Image (cartoon, grey):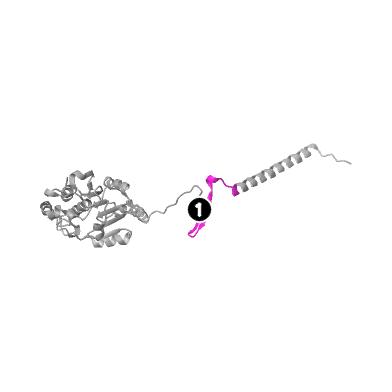
């Protein structure tokens, strides 16, 4: 005897079967797509794992070059981010030297002074050589312990601010000061010449020189007369006649810095002034002299 199933039951079974087939089909399609994408990922989103002696690195297929931050820059970022002490110069003053460094660095940068902005100057001249000269030995030791990457040297200044007028008169009248280019600065008889600086100062061709020391803030303090004069002689002594040296003098609102910079670095060589900072572009004078007591063109 044949048993006839009711229609509603038969339709329910058919629909249930179709739903199962659809679910199973979708499942296998999804698994297949996932497997293919896992085996063949999209090129523009691929992350490739490469093993090296330094460990496992994750790299993008788009050839991203990862470069380590230089130690001097890392030190500068941490120092200025965590410090409440600001550099001695204002932003507009700093920007004057920064513009020159952007064009010339990496280069040779000589700085008279070691201060809160020294790490910044060394970082802006990354890859070049920046050295600092300071009169305070205890301060040099303190900074060297904190930032061993900075190259600094101790310098003794024999003249004081109160000697400025006499030194200016002497330099204008003495032949020894006018013929600075024909004499090794280390044996110069001119009272304004710094003859006992580290050997590296005399043996290096300096692209930039910053005069921001010695202190010079009262009559008995070491003045910047000799630093400014010597900076000018170093710039004029460049071996190639076509070369120039950027010389910066800070605190030109003070009498010594104002008068000595204009006299020995020359008003005609003044390129820019921002606030208390002057920028002079001093050319090599190898084939010239200072006859007639003239230091400037």
Q: Quadrant of the C terminus?
A: top left
Q: Which residue is mark 1?
A: 58
Q: Going 69% across and 43% down the picture, which residue do you hit?
A: 25
Q: Left or right of 222: which side holds 111?
A: right
- Image coords of residue 203 (percent x, y): 25, 58
Q: Going 26% across and 51% down the picture, which residue do you hit?
A: 208
Residue range in magenta is 37-56
- Quarter residue 129 falls in: bottom left
- Quarter residue 216 falls in: bottom left
- Quarter residue 150 falls in: bottom left
Q: Quadrant of the N terminus?
A: top right
Q: Is residue 22 visible?
A: yes
Furthest-top residue in view? 7
Q: Left or right of 63: which side holds 255?
A: left
Q: Is residue 224 visible?
A: no
Q: Foreground residue, 73 or 44?
A: 44
Furthest-front residue in view? 287
Find numbered disc 1 in the image and state the secondary structure of the residue it sits on: strand
Taking the magenta stretch, the answer to whether it contains residue 295 is no
- Image coords of residue 119 (percent x, y): 31, 54
Tell me if mark 1 has few (under 14), some (14-19) or many (20+) residues whose alpha carbon lies within 10 angstroms of its own.
few
Furthest-right residue in view? 1
Taking the magenta stretch, the answer to whether it contains residue 53 is yes
- Image coords of residue 271 (percent x, y): 23, 43
- Image coords of residue 53 (percent x, y): 49, 60
Report how many numbered discs are placed on residues in the image. 1
Q: Foreground residue, 173 or 153?
A: 173
Q: Left or right of 44: which side holds 256?
A: left
């Amino acid at each position: 005897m044949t048993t006839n199933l009711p229609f509603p039951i038969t339709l329910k079974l058919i629909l249930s079967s179709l739903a199962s087939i659809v679910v199973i089909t979708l499942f296998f399609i999804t698994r297949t797509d996932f497997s293919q994408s896992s085996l063949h990922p999209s090129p523009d989103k691929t992350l490739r794992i490469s093993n090296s002696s330094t460990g496992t690195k994750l790299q993008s297929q788009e050839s991203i070059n990862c470069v380590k931050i230089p130690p001097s820059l890392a030190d500068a970022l941490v120092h200025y981010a965590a410090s409440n002490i600001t550099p001695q110069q204002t932003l507009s003053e700093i920007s004057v030297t920064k513009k020159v460094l952007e064009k010339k660095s990496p280069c040779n940068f000589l700085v008279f002074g070691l201060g809160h902005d020294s790490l910044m100057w060394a970082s802006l001249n990354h890859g070049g050589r920046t050295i600092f000269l300071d009169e305070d030995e205890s301060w040099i030791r303190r900074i060297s312990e904190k930032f061993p990457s900075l190259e600094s040297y101790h310098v003794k200044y024999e003249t004081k601010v109160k000697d400025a007028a006499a030194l200016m008169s002497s330099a204008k009248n003495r032949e020894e000061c006018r013929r600075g280019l024909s004499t090794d600065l280390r044996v110069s008889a001119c009272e304004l010449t710094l003859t006992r600086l580290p050997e590296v100062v005399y043996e290096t061709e300096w692209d930039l020189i910053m005069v921001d020391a010695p202190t010079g803030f009262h009559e008995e303090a070491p003045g910047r007369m000799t630093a400014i004069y010597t900076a000018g002689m170093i710039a004029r002594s460049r071996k190639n006649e076509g070369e120039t040296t950027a010389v910066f003098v800070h605190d030109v609102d003070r009498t010594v810095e104002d008068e000595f910079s204009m006299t020995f670095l020359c008003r005609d060589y003044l390129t820019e002034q921002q606030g208390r900072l002057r920028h002079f572009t001093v050319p090599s004078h190898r084939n010239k002299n200072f006859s007639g007591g003239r230091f400037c063109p």
